[in-house]
Amino acid sequence: MRLGINGVGRIGRNLWRAVHLGCPEMQVVAVNDTARPELIAHLLRYDSVRGRFPGTVRCLGDAIEVDGTAVPITGHATPDRIDWARHGVDLVIEATGQFTRGDAARGHLAGGAPLVVISTASPDADVCLMMGINEHVFDPARHRVISNSCCTTYCVATIASPLDQVYGIRDGTLTAAYSAGSRPGPLLDGVHPNLRMARANATTIVPAGVPGVRHALGRVMPQLAGRIAATALRVPATTASAATLVLRLARRAGAAEVNAVLEAAAGSVLKGYLEVSHEPLVSADVVGRPASCVVDAALTAASGDLVRVVGWYDNEWGYAHRLLDLARYLHQQAGGTGLTGGG
């Protein structure tokens, strides 16, 4: 499978690293980014969170060489100017964080990309898919620009989906302790239209609204649309986050029973996406784990029809793996190497 990446930032580089480490059936064949190629090569080679890239990385000017394979790099500002057809890509990952609307991401189709996956929630992509939750609704005839939702929604959905199936969910709240490193705020108080986000995120806990999670959850689990209120607390941690989900169920449940339901899902339909741990974890313990959610079973609590579940997640690394899982699934469903490009 031949991948193109637009935007070699945090997610793009994590994605490239994950392909190199464990996806022999995939190959990054072309990338596009407006940053200088030598800067991109340097940041791919050295990562303050992941460490050294597990291979040799060199900048060749118009290409980045990884373990002797040259990957062409271009610097176009908009998707419609990128010639993906020239490189024979099967699927493009839109990872800039800028072209999240469906119409903007469709520019990649004009350049010959058969399929486009947006690496965040999108309000108007052709469809929003999450592995283990609703990937079965993909229709190759109608869906060419696909949103993979976002890392926090993945964590929440892998908890909510099995509990909704067994108990039914009436409503709930989400509070996410979100690592600042993924979208860094100012080191010192600065200028920002959101007065809380203007404060120093390196030394303070900053409340932030996350309406995107609420809407993204509604796209993949329509039965919960508008039922989960969400808030994030941006914490001064480099990576790894936690989601505390408080749910009102349709019937009473006990903590041990809830954990058993989640463990059953983790061993079946959500295997690889959801894990349940009975160890006393802290955020550092999930760094580098590819699951989208590691439930901290000791923190599960229940009172009548109210339950609280806490899930840890390495927001960058887990999400990069879901991008690859979704890309693999789409490629298979769309006919593998039989994909064709077009405008």
Image (tube, rainbow, N blue to C red):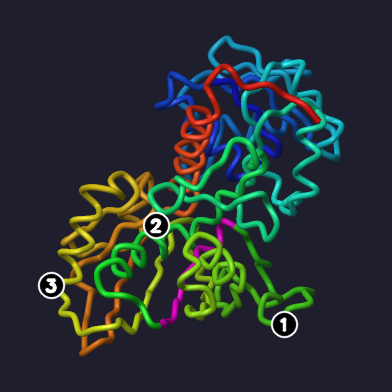
Q: How many marks?
A: 3
Q: Is residue 77 magenta?
A: no
Instruction: Identify the image quadrant of the C terminus.
Output: top right
Which residue does the image show at 68% across and 71% down from the upper left?
188
Which residue in the protein does label 1 denote?
Answer: 195
Q: Are marks 1 and 3 in contact (CB under 8 Å)?
A: no
Q: Is residue 181 magenta?
A: yes
Residue 246: image location, x then y, percent = 36, 80
Left or right, 117 with respect to 278, comes to: right
Residue 168: image quadrant is bottom left
Give the CA distance from mark 1 to mark 2: 27 Å
Residue 16: image location, x then y, percent = 55, 31
> The magenta stretch spans which residues?
171-182
Which residue in the protein does label 2 denote?
Answer: 313
Callout 2 crowding tier (Cα within 10 Å): few <14, some 14–19, many ≥20: many
- Dot label at residue 256: 3
- Callout 3 secondary element: helix
